[in-house]
């Protein structure tokens, strides 16, 4: 089924619009699975992402700005997101010893246990969602999405707009 039929549209104005609508619809469908999985653990998608980032930072931790820069999707108020995680005992914060203006955030042991519990279900969800694509198709999809995100990137001879 085409995106035009799926969304019951009369007209799509360009190939670029069609591609955008396909990416948006696909993102919505894929993220719904994760929203449900994280909800079972009383987490939002953004909270899971922040915890995953902090786990990757290890014992060094990250500043709030460092977490914000690594988020997959932009979060307008990273401080409030981290506040909610701190209340749940999933992150701790401390002032940087060298620069007292900087607050360093760490994932707690509780957060690491929760993430370990989610690792396999997350991986299995990814595999299930993309089971209809070959490894080569997945590589190609990733390359094309990176290219689409590149601002002012080179265009093929044919203008897709």
Image (tube, rainbow, N blue to C red):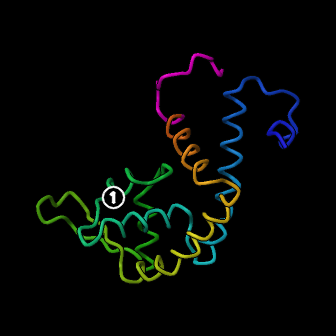
Magenta: main secondary structure equals: loop
Q: Which residue lies furthest to the left in this view?
A: 98
**Which of the image's four quarters has the C terminus?**
top right
- In depth, the one of 45 and 95 nearer the eye is 45
Q: Which residue is drawn at 14% across and 58% down?
A: 99
Report the label total: 1
Q: Residue at x 28, y 67 (%)?
A: 61
Quadrant holding the N terminus: top right
Q: In this view, does 31 lie above or below 21?
A: below
Side of 128 where 121 appears, left or right? left
Mark 1 falls on what kind of element?
A: helix
Q: Residue at x 53, y 21 (%)?
A: 155
Find residue 22 and report its image quarter.
top right
Residue nearest the viewer, comparing 26 with 40: 26
Residue 76 drawn at (x, y percent): 47, 50
Is residue 107 toward the left or the right of residue 44 in the image? Answer: left
Question: x, y percentage for residue 3?
Answer: 79, 39
* Residue corresponding to mark 1: 64
Q: Which residue is found at the position 79% from the left and 27% from the top?
A: 12
Q: Magenta residues, as a range?
A: 148-161
Q: Is residue 156 magenta?
A: yes
Q: Quadrant of residue 5?
A: top right
Q: Is residue 149 magenta?
A: yes
Give above or below for 77 relative to 151.
Answer: below
Give residue 139's position: percent from left, percent from top: 54, 48
Picture quadrant where residue 80 is located? bottom left
Residue nearest the observer in this picture, 157 or 81: 157
Q: Position of residue 48 (x, y in %)?
A: 50, 67
* Mark 1 burial class by Cα count in 10 Å: few <14, some 14-19, many 20+: some
């Amino acid at each position: 089924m085409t995106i035009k039929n799926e969304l019951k549209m009369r007209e799509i104005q360009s190939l670029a619009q069609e591609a955008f609508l396909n990416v948006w619809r696909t993102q919505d469908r894929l993220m719904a699975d994760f929203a449900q999985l994280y909800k079972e653990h009383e987490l939002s998608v953004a909270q899971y992402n922040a915890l995953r980032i902090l786990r990757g930072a290890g014992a060094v931790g990250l500043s709030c700005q460092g977490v914000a820069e690594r988020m997959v999707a932009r979060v307008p108020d990273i401080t409030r997101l981290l506040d909610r995680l701190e209340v749940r005992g999933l992150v701790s914060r401390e002032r940087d010893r060298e620069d007292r203006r900087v607050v360093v955030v760490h994932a707690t042991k509780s957060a690491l246990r929760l993430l370990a519990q989610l690792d396999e279900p997350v991986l299995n969800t990814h595999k299930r969602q993309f089971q209809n694509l070959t490894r080569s198709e997945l590589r190609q999809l990733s390359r094309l999405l990176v290219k689409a995100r590149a601002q002012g990137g080179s265009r093929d001879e044919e203008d897709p707009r």
